[in-house]
Image (cartoon, rainbow, N blue to C red):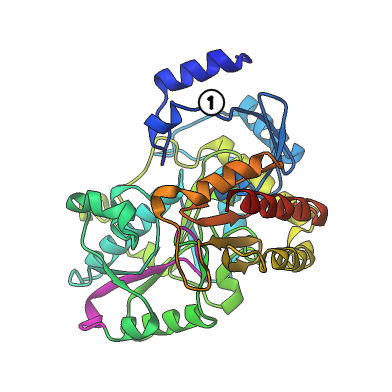
Amino acid sequence: MNNPVKLTQTDHRHLWHPFTQQQEWCAEEPMIIVSGKGVYLRDIQGRDYIDGNSSIWTNIHGHSHPHIVAAIQRQAAQLDHTSFLGTTHPSAIELAKRLVALFPKNSLSRVFFSDNGSTAIEAALKMTFQYWQLIGHPEKKRFVAFSNCYHGDTAGAASLSGIPLFSDRFAGIHFPAEHVASMAELEALSHQESIAAIILEPLIQGVAGMRPWPQGMLQAVRAFCNRTGALLILDEVMTGFGRTGTMFACEQEQITPDLLAMAKGLTGGTVPLAATMVTEKIYAAFLGSTEEQKTFYYGHSYTAHPIGCAAALANLDVFEEEKVLEKLPATIKHFDKALTTLKNMSHIADIRQYGLIAGIDVMLDPTSKISYPWQDQMGAKICRAARKHGLLTRPIRDTIVFMPPLCITTEQIDQAVEALGKAIEEVC
């Protein structure tokens, strides 16, 4: 298993990678990652790279954090798995209590576990749809999302997508959803009384290219929902667990949604686990006798997986014990300062940053707003070039994503930004 040639042959013979054109993949030598420590990943050749996109936006405290690793080992040795249908276990019970405590009292009081961001959103959609039926308002079945949004790849979650690349091909199996680009367009919707829920990524859209919302947007959407009776679903899959500078992005505008989806950073980026949190009001609508058929018939084999719950508890321990949130302002300030060193490069069109999240746009001619032909895959070429300088990240088309683990040091930020600068210079 440590022979690069044999591993490459076997990968090319048997694997199918996500979001990857396999014909091109199989024509190249793959990067084979074999270990990780802190902000670094190591490939099979022994080369180290700063993990510049937190392993697809999941890693929080660095790879193989000893406290989280120890918790996973203890849990695996004691209880590796048990069905959550008809039984429960201590790790899930404790985790639910601690997650509820992260939000204002009497707000999000119930936790429904699943395994990834798409299924957390899927659960929120089905809860919303059934909730309105149960309380006698089946006419409230319209879902409204925002242009360029992304909420996952399962059929329900993908129905909300505002990015044609991810949704148009599968439109025939999606439910109808409406999209608006701004608060003005949301306010202009007709028959607002039939809207079941509004869903958005708080503070910043991810797959859209790391695009922040105008200040006050969350409060405005919350006020709209309060006035029209629509539920508010927040997708904190990417923004949760410190990415924007607070534990959850919604804290920064002091609002609480009716439903909130979390995943990615929930376990510190170690093992799959997700949660959909809801208010007591929504939960109570599902209560009744078996004969009343109010039960929420949805779940997965690995719901509330014990090892995942143990990792998530350890993740929250690290936030507390290492005072992660208290240290973030200084790190974010340096992050912002370091990114400014790229602004004068001739092919940099824009740099958008929120917390420890950044999107760096490259263009053929930024002054005239002339983009590279998308077929040139300039973003991918820049990211491949950055590997030579010790940085591993991925683009969204020609937007370079830089979203490191929260534990990154100022020196490592400087190294990563320098690597990006060199890669952009070499490719562009």
> Magenta stretch containing residue 200, yes or no?
yes
Q: Quadrant of residue 385?
A: top right
Residue 149's place in the image compared with 54, above or below, is below
Magenta range is 189-207
Residue under the image location 32 percent in, 53 percent down: 165
The front one of 286 and 336 is 336
As helix, strand or loop, the secondary structure at mark 1 comes to loop
* Left or right of residue 180: residue 323: right
Q: Which residue is mark 1?
A: 29
Residue 47's place in the image compared with 155, above or below, is above
Residue under the image location 72 percent in, 26 percent down: 46
Residue 269 seen in this snapshot? no
Residue 281 seen in this snapshot? yes
Residue 273: % across, % down: 51, 44
What kind of residue is marked 1?
Glu
Outermost residue toward the right in this view: 411
Residue 87's place in the image compared with 337, above or below, is above
